Image: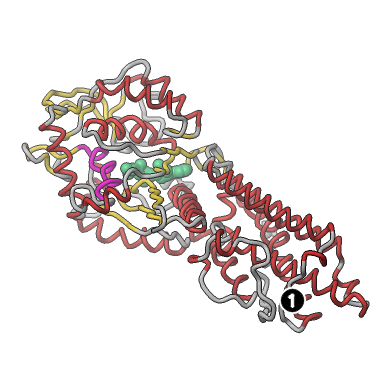
Amino acid sequence: MADSFYISTPIYYINDVPHLGHAYTEVAADFFARFKRLQGFDVTFLTGTDEHGQNVLRAAEAKGMSPKEWADQVVPRWHEVWKALDISYTDFIRTTEARHEEPVQKFVQELYDRGEIYLGSYEGLYCVGCEAFKTPDELVDGKCPLHPTREIEHVKEENYFFRLSKYADRLVELWETDERSVMPEVRRNEVLGKVRQGLEDLSMSRISFDWGIPIPWDSKHVIYVWVDALLNYITAAGYASDEAKFSRLWPADVHLIGKDILWFHSVIWPAMLMALDLPLPRTVYAHGFLLVGGAKMSKSSLTGISPNDLTETFGTDGYRYYFLREVSFGQDGTFSWESMLARYNSDLANDFGNLASRVLNMIGRYLGAEVPEPPSASELDDADRRLIDSYDQALGGMEMAMEALSPTEALKAAWTFVRKANSYVEEVGPWVLAKDESQRRRLEVVLYNLAETLRLIALLTFPATPRAAQELWRRLGLDGELDRASFAVDGKWGGLAAGAKTTKGDALFPRLEDES
Ligand code: MSP
């Protein structure tokens, strides 16, 4: 049985509609999932919605609905957007499902039974946008810097507390000894710096509203929405419901998150797991923000552009490729229409799309749209061998980049091969060979190499541009779904069999004109 690989995204608050910021996390996670499938892993890819808490309650009240009615109405929209972006998640969890709520109660009860929770009282500041308590020094001009349009609230209530403070030393030790526990390094240093100064216990219940999962031994309280939400990573994996599944899937390999929610994932979450002696996720990876004109992109900042607005022009593949390639993974990146257009035209329309049309065209014109006999080793010259080497290096480079969890670097590696293939076409000039009957076999060798190159490009680009890759696969006369392909079986040079019928088709990425 294939090894398991378990990757998760955050679960999204449903008071917002899916925007480019959310889609950024989702597309990156999908790239990982598809790449790991090609590496032969049995991938579990979890996403979902975070449906409790004050944020959602207020959004529902504003619409005159119960929060559950509201959730049921908006959740299909999230599925729709993810489907339109070809997100290949294998599970979608909603925190209002029984499969989540019941194990959450069991988990919290177990914490209580072990003496990890006590009753206290809390007085302080709360940002409903973050669903988090804030200290005065975290505010800028009295406002939460992540939600400057919302008022900070003053809260005074009886709460249950989780003994978070006692885990500070173990967390520091974890980050100091395990470089992959929190990535990239700058984020690990960030939490290290903070936690070295000590930790306070965490208020983990709320009493002033009831939209949440009740504390099992005291139902006046609901479980703090972050404690509820973080547990999705194990409830979806079978914790307290399906032991066999849980031991197969847990610990997760990667929790992919944005840097805004690093604290919850790198401090609170592992401490909760430590308290029950459960294994910790192997890696929490916090990517940067997508910015528009310097501001974090969200609905409330009025820069919320829906993914749909962009896929209409650039297609799903163009959309995915741009965000993966243009924003250096781990850092903040600025979205602009101009850079998207430039990236699309240069990498997709020119490098990738033109190569595919030229090669398929020539096979059509010179060889009657049929893949020729593969060359023997003695038929290869230096130029051919350099092309083949370039493939090996690109695949190796992608695998290394993905070990370092960088889709951006992985795509750079893939494109070294795409560009190499373009220069090979220029170097060998098949159109010259085609004029000379004595060069017939050489022409076949060159076009075989190029057809094989396209096949391997389809494989390497599939995690980023699944539609074009699958279409190219089909145009090379190959049956089957790239979803089921693997580097081990399909990734070896020379896999394309002679006699396959090719089709030319329309441009994979039609060139776009700048209309601004
Ligand atoms: N519900 C919590 C997460 C709970 S996970 C146990 C939450 N939801 S959220 O909808 O507000 O945001 C989820 C994620 O969306 C962020 O962590 C981040 O990954 C992503 N992004 C939202 N806006 C973003 C940008 N402008 N840029 C990049 N990612 C952004 O927090």
- Residue at (48, 66) in percent of width and height: 484
Span shown in magenta: 224-236
Up-down relation of residue 472 to residue 256 (above or below): below
Residue sitting at x 39%, y 23%: 141
Which quarter of the figure is the C terminus placed in?
bottom right
| Relative vertical location of residue 338 with respect to residue 293 in this rendering, above or below | below
- Residue 397 point in image, percent of width and height: 63, 47
Q: Residue 313 sits in which quadrant?
A: bottom right
Asked which quadrant contains residue 91, the reply is bottom left
Task: Kindly state the secondary structure of the residue where label 1 is placed.
Answer: loop
Q: In front: 85, or 197?
A: 197
Is 479 situated left or right of 390 in this image?
Answer: left
Which residue is outermost to the top?
Answer: 197
Residue 167 colored magenta? no
Residue 330 position in % (x across, y down): 52, 38
Q: Residues within 10 Å of mark 1 (few under 14, many from 20)?
A: some
**Where in the figure is residue 491, as x and y percent of width and height?**
60, 61
| Quarter of the picture holding the N terminus | bottom left
Q: Look at the image and tell me whether residue 365 can be seen.
A: yes
Q: Which residue is mark 1?
A: 373
| Main secondary-structure element of the magenta-colored stretch | helix
233 part of magenta stretch = yes
**Closest to the observer, 258 or 356:** 356
Which is more toward the observer, 127 or 488?
A: 488
Q: Is residue 483 left or right of residue 357?
A: left
Q: Is residue 306 visible?
A: no
